[in-house]
Image (cartoon, rainbow, N blue to C red):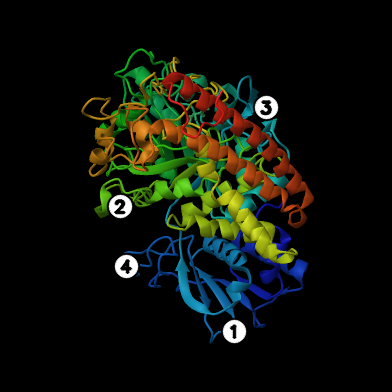
Amino acid sequence: IDPAWLPDEALRAVGSRRVRVDGEGPLADTVRAEAAYACERFGGRIVGPGDRPDLLLRLADDSLGGEGGEGGEGGGSGGNGEDCPRHPEGFTLHRTLDRTTVTASAAAPAGLLHGYFHVVRLGEAAFTPAPAATHRPALTPRMLDHWDNVDVHPVMGQVERGYAGGSLFWRDGRPRDEPHRIRAYARLLASCGIDALAVNNVNVHATEARLLTDRLDDVAAIADLLRPYGIRTHLSVSCAAPVLLGGQATADPLDPHVRAWWRETADRVYARIPDFGGFVVKADSEGQPGPFAYGRSHADGANLLADALAPHGGIVHWRAFVYDHRQDWRDRTTDRARAAHDHFAPLDGEFRPNAILQVKHGPIDFQTREPVSPVIGAMPRTRIAVELQATQEYTGQQWHVCALAPMWSQVLRFRPHGEDGPGVAGVAAGDGGGRGGGGGLVAVSNAGADPFWTGHPLAQFNLYAFGRLAWQPDADPASLLDEWIELTFTPNRTADPDRLRAGLRHVVGGSWETYEKYTAPLGVGFMVQPGHHYGPSVDGYEYSPWGTYHFADRDGVGVDRSRATGTGYAAQYGKPWSDTYETPDTCPDELLLFFHHVPYGHVLRSGKTVIQHIYDTHFEGVTEAEAARALWASLKDLVSPARHARVTERYEEQVRCAREWRDQVNSYFLRKSGVPDRHGRRIH
Ligand code: GCW
């Protein structure tokens, strides 16, 4: 099994020192065991109270309140003791010159764990002087949703949209009996800051529904493995559970028997798993049952579960991914992009404090480029979680390198109300509003039973970066990439550290832009093969019921979502964005075809026509993918053979597929428009 970003070598700095861990309880024991492992490997030693340690990790009451922030690096603002309560996951690191011992102090055991891994990340630098700094997560929870099925689904397989082998948790209807893998996974996740995980698909099929009741032991067994690494277990549940499992006549959220059933069921879950996190729900979405069947609202549905969980401190993540997936493509008045806002914005203020609305970052579905969902800025009295997709459904399915941190960072920094309002990360943190807390950050996991965890070894960066951005949303994606490179590839242990670093930065750093260049242009999205969503099919969804169209004809392409002449989607934004997106003149180039239908000769802000932009980017994208493949080949002497071979194999497929994208997209638009390429390149 690949060690990902925690090879033993990454433990050298800690492991070669004298370490003391002061604290009781299971998480402190985990930290002690981690430190002991590192020391065993590198000649350091665990010392007792009598000895002076080089590194002290301690539980202390006085550690968190009142500490200053650390100038943008700390995730949350530093704050003072009053408006900044002690965070149970936070810690303060002292590594000043006058102290010979580097100390990480935490108010609670989870802070010890995060403090330990922070020191691991810093490596030798942790033992050089720096001002004392308090770290605490900006967002909570920092959660992974596994779209894992217990049974193999006839179409979706073991993991829906999974590109990393089977599930880490389930195999052929049973728990996958590999506790060491789950433990190792939990360790990787904790080390990048993740603290919550849902163990089954949001599409809850018959067997999976039973995890809530008679198969709860299977869930408890997973929770036992995640707990030592500070990760809470959550479960995706079906709104129809009272009927399916409880023998009730209805699942109506307002029915008293239904309410009693959910309360008793939640009680039983907590009796078995006392630190259970809560439920995740996909309702009235793509065929999943929900409150609409009973004429009830989504607030009714979410509050039902929230009330059942509340006595135990649990939360419900209620997904906002609700739209008509049986749309008539002839109907130009329906716009799928509008759906989440149309359904949910009117419900602002109706959700319980422990009901979190989980919103996909874009209005459609995890495309390579989408605007930020207008729902995120439209519900100031609702706790909002932002959902990202680490699994690369539309971004190359872990055969293509596509580092998503730059995209996620843009999303998290976007300000729905312009410069004066909070950013998306602030909304997810619960800043400034009557929402009584945020909903945190969620990603659909890209990990599975594959020996490299994520199929493509370089896709490990997406998982790592997700955890780090959830902890610190203003982190610079390029710095996170460097951090990940140091940990994963330990360049200093190779013959040419600088060449390795530069090479990795190059092949991973710009990979999202490269992928965007050879796939659907200017934010128009889709153009993928229907069903599995891999590879190009320009008209694959054009006459389908899914609501994802590009409307290309001989004169132009794109979707008119303006208020004046289109679907009105642009008006779902607050100012300034509703104005910015309203006209092609002010709309950013990269989203032009998402918001407007324009002629092929329309001149972009870049100075190019739309049609020439399409040709140019598609040629460039392939050239860049080919160059990345060649650069990777040149790193062979610096990367472990197994890793190098796996990535090499994937690059062959990426380049093949990129050429297919280029040729289909360019040929399609040449044929539609009749406009030749200015540079006379070969288009078929
Ligand atoms: O991205 C789409 C996927 C579905 C998925 C759905 C969702 C789990 O194609 O496979 O179902 O979104 O997010 O619910």
N-terminal of the pair, mark 4 or mark 3, is 4
Residue drawn 56% across and 75% down?
Answer: 103
Q: Amino acid at mark 1?
A: Thr
Location of mark 4 (residue):
82
**Residue at mark 4 to residue at mark 1: CA–CA distance:** 31 Å
- Which mark, by number, is residue 100? 1
Amino acid residing under circle 2: Pro
Give the foreground label among 3 and 1.
Answer: 1
The residue labelled by disc 2 is 422
Q: Is residue 430 above or below residue 94?
A: above
Q: CA distance from mark 3 to mark 1?
A: 54 Å
Mark 4 to mark 2 CA distance (whole Å): 21 Å
Q: How many marks?
A: 4
- Give left or right: position of 269 versus 26: left
Residue 180 position, x and y percent, is: 72, 47
Residue 173's mark? 3
Mark 4 or 2, closer to the camera:
2
Secondary element under disc 3, as helix, strand or loop, is loop
User: Which residue occupies the foreground of this view, 487 or 132?
Assistant: 487
User: Percent position (x, y) of residue 5?
Assistant: 65, 55
The residue mark sitting in front, 4 or 1, is 1
Q: Residue furthest left?
A: 564
